[in-house]
Amino acid sequence: MSDKEFDLIIIGGGPGGYVAAIRAAQLEMKVLLIDDRQADDGKPAPGGTCLNVGCVPSKALLDSSKHYHHVQHDYAAHGISVDGVSMDVGTMIERKRKVVKQLNGGLLQLFKANKIEFANGRGKLLADREVEITPCEGETYRARGKHVILAAGSVPFTIPNVEIDGEHIVDNVGALEFDAVPERMGVIGAGVIGLEMGSVWKRLGSEMVLFEAMDELLPVVDKDMSRAAAREFKKQGLDIRLGTKVAGAEVTDGKVKVTFTEGDEEKTDTFDKLLVAVGRRAASDELLAEDSGVELTERGQVKVDEHCRTSVSRVWAIGDLVRGPMLAHKASEEGVAVVETIAGQHGHINLDHVPWVIYTDPEIAWVGKTEKELSEDGVEYKAGSFPFAATGRGLAMGEAAGHVKILADAETDRILGAQIIGPSASEMIAEIVVAMEFAGASEDLARIIHAHPTLSEAIHEAALAVEKRAIHKAN
Ligand code: FAD
Ligand code: NAD
């Protein structure tokens, strides 16, 4: 028997769950949002992986470390000399914590303002849309929702023979909290987290080695992009060892000895810290009672259709817990779409147009199909690209590495995909996402007036280059 009834119960208060809760409250639903995360001081810490140990703190450290790197390496070219530059890791980490804490507090205020009931504790889905809530403090109770959204997110994958101890061998959580710059740091996985967190600690002074099992860096983007990225990372001193598979790691005398295979050879290397960043899996353990009726995939994701419906009527699932890219904005938009569908509106999410960004320097961003995917699908396409080195703004800023590439259908000219490597790629990709959502053609981007001098002129020129009529480069 449930103690309470709600229009909607949401398990998980990350960018999927909390955004869904706010949208539901706007649509006058009575909402219970359950999230188990607490800060070090025991206060609730809503916002999920993204806010607490993911997107936000990693970007805070990426920004801090970028400032430090610029002062040391790039100011001289502008005629600015700075003597005696020093850096305090403690202050940097504290600034990051403050940013997170401020946003945690902001969310709690938003829940209050929207009259969302927030429970800091664990939720478990039982049969018939009943949820058992075990608060961090207090008695376990039950509630029933007319609808339930599962938004429990994801947790890091582990690998055999590499045990996370939180001190020498860490996952994303530990890599955001070092109290000193490791002299020599290893990373297993040159994926998104490996490249971002590897960049942070490299910029702050670590010798950085990344072990990557695949023979190719970033196979999710086209070769011209990944080659350009590899070139820049090499210049920065990131030692990315492709085709190396880590077999194990052990801690002795405060050092981590990593055993890995390179080709047929077994080798070892030693580090002060080792980050394990080999992907993430859905956090479906202990979320569902045996009789909940919710089906999982072989990989432990909650099985959903294109509208995020699970196998149980009026139980929905979103974000990292389900198929599709593990990205905060994808989770949030799924949350909004589900709630609007529940409210009888036309909730909609287009997984084909979800932008990706890797916040390295240069940034890497993409949306839609790559050349590789279009070729595999047998789609005829035209490509136009343009380098930042040929833009006035890029050169004036001293950030001219990288390029924009736009892919358009050979017959209809509709934009099918785009990739950007370069300064502010994270912001610029939005223009192309908008164009794609409006079913735009490369011609549309080519005809839109872009301010001069801006980085966005590289998008304009890449669109012109699709028809071989870029102005500031030979076509
Ligand atoms: P989560 O954010 O994981 O939230 C789920 C919440 O539910 C968590 O607080 C969890 O503790 C809680 N929970 C789980 N089970 C229960 C339960 N039974 N009861 C109560 N609560 C429960 N994505 C981007 O788009 N941009 C980025 O820049 C970016 N950077 C990242 C950097 C790092 C280091 C990491 C690890 C991830 C990053 N991501 C980024 C990915 C992003 O964090 C996730 O895609 C996003 O958080 C998924 O949102 P979600 O709501 O599905 O789940
Ligand atoms: P990832 O999938 O991006 O990269 C993992 C890498 O580890 C892969 O390249 C894989 O080949 C490699 N690998 C696996 N096992 C290995 C082994 N034994 N030895 C060597 N290499 C091995 O995963 P991640 O970096 O852990 O990030 C997880 C997810 O979090 C991302 O896919 C993304 O969805 C999300 N995320 C997003 C952002 C962003 O949007 N900027 C930032 C961080 C994380």
Image: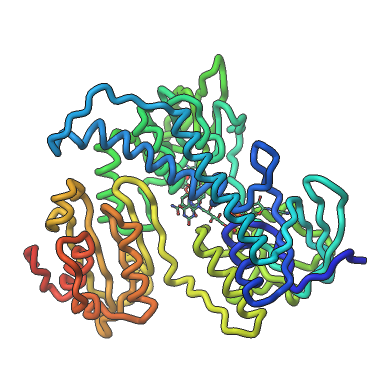
Residue 229 located left or right of residue 255: left
Residue situated in front as seen by the camera: 81 or 463: 81
Residue, far right: 1
Q: Position of residue 231 (x, y in %)?
A: 25, 43
Residue situated in front as seen by the camera: 266 or 198: 198
- In the picture, which quadrant includes the N terminus? bottom right
Q: Is residue 319 above or below residue 259?
A: below
The residue lying at 14 percent from left, 58 percent from top is 391
Q: Is residue 173 visible?
A: yes
Q: Position of residue 417 (x, y in %)?
A: 33, 70
Q: Quadrant of residue 465?
A: bottom left
Q: Is residue 281 visible?
A: no
Residue 468 located left or right of residue 410: left
- The total number of labels drawn is 0
Residue 449 located left or right of residue 225: left
Residue, far top: 253
The residue lying at 33 percent from left, 64 percent from top is 429
Q: Is residue 143 above or below residue 235?
A: below
Q: Position of residue 338 (x, y in %)?
A: 62, 74
- In the picture, which quadrant includes the C terminus? bottom left
Q: Position of residue 95 (x, y in %)?
A: 47, 37
Q: Is residue 73 above or below residue 449?
A: above
The residue lying at 47 percent from left, 23 percent from top is 272
The residue lying at 58 percent from left, 45 percent from top is 156
Q: Quadrant of residue 168?
A: top right
Residue situated in front as seen by the camera: 222 or 32: 32
Residue 117 located left or right of residue 252: right
